[in-house]
Image (spheres, rainbow, N blue to C red):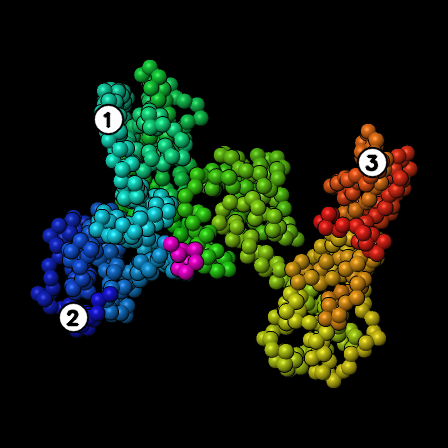
Amino acid sequence: MSERALPNNILLDFSNRKLLSPVPKKLYKSAKTYFSKRELELLKTAYNVAFQAHKEQLRKDGSQYITHPVSVASILIELNLDIETVCAGLMHDVLEDSFIQKKYLEKLFGKDIVAIVDGVSNLNKLDFESIEDRNANNLQKMALAMSKDIRVIIVKLCDRLHNMRTIEFLPREKQINKSLETLDLYGPIAIRIGMQNIRVELEDLAFQCLHPMRARMLTSAIKQAVGGRQKIISKLRKQFKYYLKNNEIPAIVQGRQKSLYSIYKKIKDKKKPFSQILDVYAFRVIVDSVDDAYRALGVIHNLHKPIGKKFKDYIAIPKSNGYQAIHTSLIALDGVPIEVQIQTKSMEIIAENGISAHWSYKTKDSVKSEAIGARKWIESFTDLDKATINSREFVEAIKTDLVYDEVYVFTPTGKIVNLKSGSTPIDFAYELHTELGNNAVACRVNRKFAPLNIRLENGQSIEIITSEKQEVSPDWLNFVVTSKARSSIRLALRNQKISQSRKAGKLMLENELRRGGVTLDHYRGSKMSRILEMIGVKSLNELLTDLGSGKKTGALVAERFFSGLRLKKNKKSKFKSMVLSDHQIEGVSVTYAKCCMPVHGDPITAHSDTDRGIVIHHSRCRQVSIPRSNTLSARYFPAMWGSDSKELHYKGHVKIHAEDRPGILADIASVFTKSNLNIVNIHSRDIDSMIIEFIVEVEVLNTDSINRLMLKLRSLRYVTSCSRIVNDSKSKNEKTNFYK
């Protein structure tokens, strides 16, 4: 960092234009092509601020540091970016490398330009090797700055491009680190916002730096291969031009060259020889309009036979980064495979420059979607920030969505939705709306019911069926692939846990208060405020959440409430049994203990578990009947069965001992089938040489149905015994972890 400050009088007074240093001729000449006089004056001011800030600084190659921001600004001008972006490019290192303060820059240039400069400065502090730990927060700040103004990342990409062009002057260790960072972070970002030209050069420069020998050998091989194919390429190009002209379709036909790094990556990833990678001849056809693009496709398909399943229409269905073209593969000239891309002129510019074209290129056929996908992705950072619990999780989500293949599906109304390849209906639901994902219970794919974890394919129509009573399942995290779905599910689960804890805490506190013959209704206004202050919480909801999550003890909290009304706890009073119906107790969803597997009709006890919420145990379960301290006993409540509004099933464990004979399992299974009961799981083990034991997990309606089942099983000829496993003293020798 420079040890001097830019004098405030120079910074604040640019009225005397004679004192200003002239802008480099090449930069000024390029700027004059599309900037107004007022904008050129602003450019001069920005250059002089940067010149003064970096006046005493040198680059690693010995040149004046000002050459770097000038080069960055030149790249931005080549992209035809607006004056605000170019000025930010000139000053992108000013805040970081000098003592100039933001407020002074804002007086000169306004908040928009300075916001871009500040966003780039935050990204400059990023250390790739520590993204996952120390500096995840920096990337998070940068991403949020991008969400406010996408030009932040455009300036940074141009900054990184010039740094990569001059990387040979850095120490070898820094060269490697910056090249890895470019390939893993900045290249994918460039793809995501559609800036293909920048992406290609960044990746090729990084590849040449990391693997110079491989790069030279591959470059030499490409030159030789292309040279040997010139006759074929020339013949095909002339053929396309001739027939397109005869059909009155104005077009430019170009040979399309694969980038150095993309060829290397294909060789490495697909494990194909170099000859197969370059065996495909690629062409790009540039036409005037979308109508001409489809007409050109017809002409080309009449010339050569298309290859099935190798046709993609990205004009009708653009990629999420705004890319549009028609891709087709054909067999030409005695079996030579060729690839053809057909685009309009505006599509070509958007394909090369991505979202940067939004500021520079407007024509009658300019596609409105050139910025939509990238902007949607970047603007999602704000929601992502709210959904993620920390910077590490935020960074992980961003990196997940950087590079991926796409799949497109349709809503029931015909709207196209682009998703990450491998997406499921749950990903689809969250892409449309968070609440739609949270309330999803089922789906239809092409009007037929399908599981929620099915992998979606191109062209499918998806309908999500919802229910307000549905809760987000943690199992969804095992199959969703998009960061939006993953972060939204995690947020919903955290909120669900808080809600369940709050409800469980309320049950605990109310049951404790009943010992004193009072309810929460006795504590209103100032009485409640004084008690909450004594306990050290801000609100009743916070207290109830702490109780349900195990941070506070119900008995001790109740004592504070009793003291508020000067009541004594009546130790002889009993808890009122809570009613369990439809798998809920007073609106709190319950789970059933796997150790004892209670079913409807069993004597039951409710346990407020810190992690799982309300857990229902068989009253004879050892976990309930073992001696407990007062602290633990406050988390156990008597419960009773109510009536279910629907025919609900419960899982129970049945232990069967039978003679080890051929066909015995089939005989046992037939009893379950005839009883119309579903076997969830079954395990077997040898007791001795004659007896085999079966442990069956079965779905039943109530105790009557499981009792009838056991009677039928006992009646089988070779069954010696049949009983339930409830983890009580009678089954103390059972290995209960076997059934979890």
Q: Residue furthest front?
A: 689
Residue at 58% over, 41% down: 453
Of badges 3 and 2, nearer the viewer stands 3
Q: Which residue is mark 1?
A: 224
Residue in the picture at 40% in, 40% down:
319
Quadrant hosting residue 183: top left
Membership of 253 in magenta stretch: no
Q: Check the image and report above or below for 387 versus 519.
A: above
Observer-nearest of 689 and 281: 689
User: Which one is in front in this view, the residue at disc 2 or the one at disc 1?
Assistant: 1
Q: Which residue matches tag 3?
A: 689
Q: Nearer the viewer, residue 324 or 249?
A: 324
Sequence-first tag of 2 and 1:
2
Above or below — where is 540 with respect to 273? below
Alpha carbon separation for disc pair 1 and 3: 75 Å
- Picture residue at 56% right of the left edge, 44% below the top: 479
Q: Which residue is mark 2?
A: 10
In whole angstroms, how far apart are the C-alphas of marks 2 and 1? 58 Å
Q: Tag count in the figure?
A: 3
Observer able to see residue 708: yes
**Which amino acid is tagged 2?**
Ile
Q: Are discs 1 and 3 less than 8 Å apart at CB?
A: no
User: Quarter-wise, where is residue 535 in the image?
Assistant: bottom right
Name the secondary structure under disc 3. Answer: loop
Q: Secondary structure at mark 2?
A: helix
Real-space CA distance between mark 3 and mark 2, rounded to the nearest whole angstrom = 98 Å
Q: Which residues are magenta?
A: 129-136
